[in-house]
Amino acid sequence: MIDLSVTIAGVRLANPVLPASGTYEFSAAHQGFFSPAELGAVINKTIFQEPRPGNPPPRICETPCGMLNAIGIPGEGVEAFIAEKLPLLRRLGPPVIVSIAGNTLEEFCELAGKITATGMADLLELDLSCPNLRDGIPWATDEGDLRRVVSRVAAATSLPVIAKLSPAVSDIAAMGVAAEQAGARALSLVNTFRGMAIDIEARRPVLGNVTGGLSGPAIRPLAVYAVYATYSRVKIPIIGIGGVSSWRDAVEFLLAGASAVAVGTGNFVNPLAMREVIRGLEGYLRDGGFASVREIVGLAQEGGR
Amino acid sequence: MSVAVYREGRLLGLAEEPRGYLDLLVEVDSIPAQARPGQFVMLRAWPGDDPFLPRPFDIAQADPARSTLRMFVKIEGRGTALLRELKPGAPLQLAGPLGRPIADLDCSSLALLARGVGAAAVTFLAAEALKRGLRVYSFLSASSAERLVCRKLLEEASTSLAVATDDGSAGYHGSALDLVEQLLTGSPVERIYSCGSRRFARYVKELDCSGKVKGFVFLEGFMACGLGDCHGCAVKRERGEGYFLVCQDGPVLRAGEVVLE
């Protein structure tokens, strides 16, 4: 029996595989695929204080080994989320991560307070890095902003805070250190990379929002590097995100230093991707003679941790 | 309520007929028995990560007894070009059936307007409606005779089929809407559906808004998942703020409720 469990900021996950925010929402359409109870954790599409319609289409565009998205985080607002979606998320079984984003520091804190008060969340993820928001100037690209928002939210909630960081910085590890010092209990590495595509016939940007976030296998080496570079500089656990669609990809992130991996765009291509990652990972550990998934975290680091 | 599954299917037959369009016959379990008119599948049939995303395709025919789906696809990008190269027996990955089925056919007559590959989706609806005893008046349009898709199947599934081509090389020389107008002045039709043409969709929306006939449109949108997760396939709502998702709220929507760009 292989032990797949990991602990993220004091919360035990039965296995290290979870969806990336905004890529898997259990609904009637998913009932025939697999049970969300099999996942290490569940997470909502990032919620804001107020309802948001999202960006005008076209919202997505396929790219080599990936896709650009400029969805703009449509959502029902926190009140409706707490009344309707959060209880459903809670009932799925695995630990619940609630992803929040605010337009201001105050909004972040208010949201954190409201989610904490429900008692239905186990972890709070701060989406500090969506490239489609705030004129594309995410919180996680300025170290001062990052420290401020993480420390203020950490003070406003009793839940462990996960900081979801942007890859659009020169030193991702330094940002990870800053988030840790400000009170983050875990890091999600990384969000999408800002990019764009141009329609050469129409001679204008493909996406309605002009720019979007690049995801998929195209970004995996960049994301693996971000995890590898940050691992030795922080003590808090890392959730690796970026182009995971198979168990091999997940193993790569774990060896680089991630304690868990989130599957994002891979869910779109194969609705069974997360289940297949969990099973494949178990097989890899068995074949390698490991008793626990925790034994391979950071194993590719020089000298290990 | 149909339950979507993810399955590996097998290509039984593939023909490029007419030129530029693929007629696909796929053997796959569960999906043919679950599929209802208005639904679609996400399909991928190549190894590796490039092209990356599965493609949404309408179901033209679902045969639960033979466990087959028939689909018509316009060859227009890299994914569809790869499909053309497949040999019988090739594996395909399918998720489906997806989308909101047209469950309520509580009327006695339908008009169906299709252009190009849009004929595939209305063929499934026509067959179901005819089986339930509805009168089904279908209209198939194309720029020319060699671009008429799915003609035989649609004809078999309809009470009557009228063909119109822009160049007059088959059927009526001119717009299929002229023929629809003739039908509407003669016999009353309770519902009208369009697929595959923005011009037809706008016409159906006008009818729907006028209150004369209930109008519906089959919509398409760029989508990554078909499951309501990616939020890519947004179509603006006519009333109020926000968007419908083609994959979740559609692909068939009441024409008067959507903004047709």
Image (tube, grey):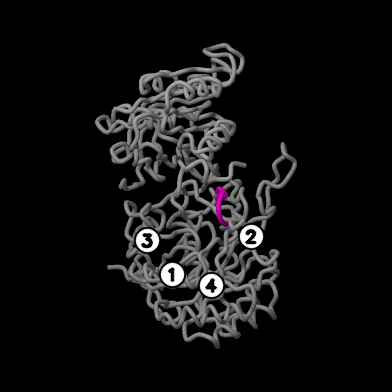
Q: Which residues are magenta?
A: B235-242
Q: Up-down: is A271 above or below B217?
A: below
Q: Are marks 3 and 2 on the same chain?
A: yes
Q: CA distance from mark 3 to mark 2?
A: 26 Å
Q: Residue A199, how many percent across, how many down?
A: 69, 42
Q: Residue B150, how many percent across, how many down?
A: 44, 22
Parent chain of label 1: A
Q: What label does residue A296 carry, if any?
A: 1
Q: CA distance from mark 1 to mark 2?
A: 27 Å
Compare marks 3 and 2 and give the one earlier in the sequence.
Answer: 2
Residue type (three-letter) at the residue carrying disc 4: Ile
Q: Up-down: is B42 above or below B240?
A: above
Residue type (three-letter) at the residue carrying disc 1: Ile
Q: Residue A82, how many percent across, how many down?
A: 44, 73
Q: Which residue is mark 3?
A: A278
Q: CA distance from mark 1 to mark 4?
A: 31 Å
Mark 1 against mark 4, which lies toward the viewer?
A: 4
Q: Which residue is mark 2?
A: A193
Compare marks 1 and 4 and give the one earlier in the sequence.
Answer: 4
Parent chain of label 3: A
Q: Are marks 2 and 4 on the same chain?
A: yes
Q: Is residue A199 visible?
A: yes
Parent chain of label 2: A
Q: CA distance from mark 2 to mark 4?
A: 19 Å
Q: Is residue A298 visible?
A: no
Kind of element beneath mark 2:
strand
Compare marks 1 and 3 and give the one earlier in the sequence.
Answer: 3
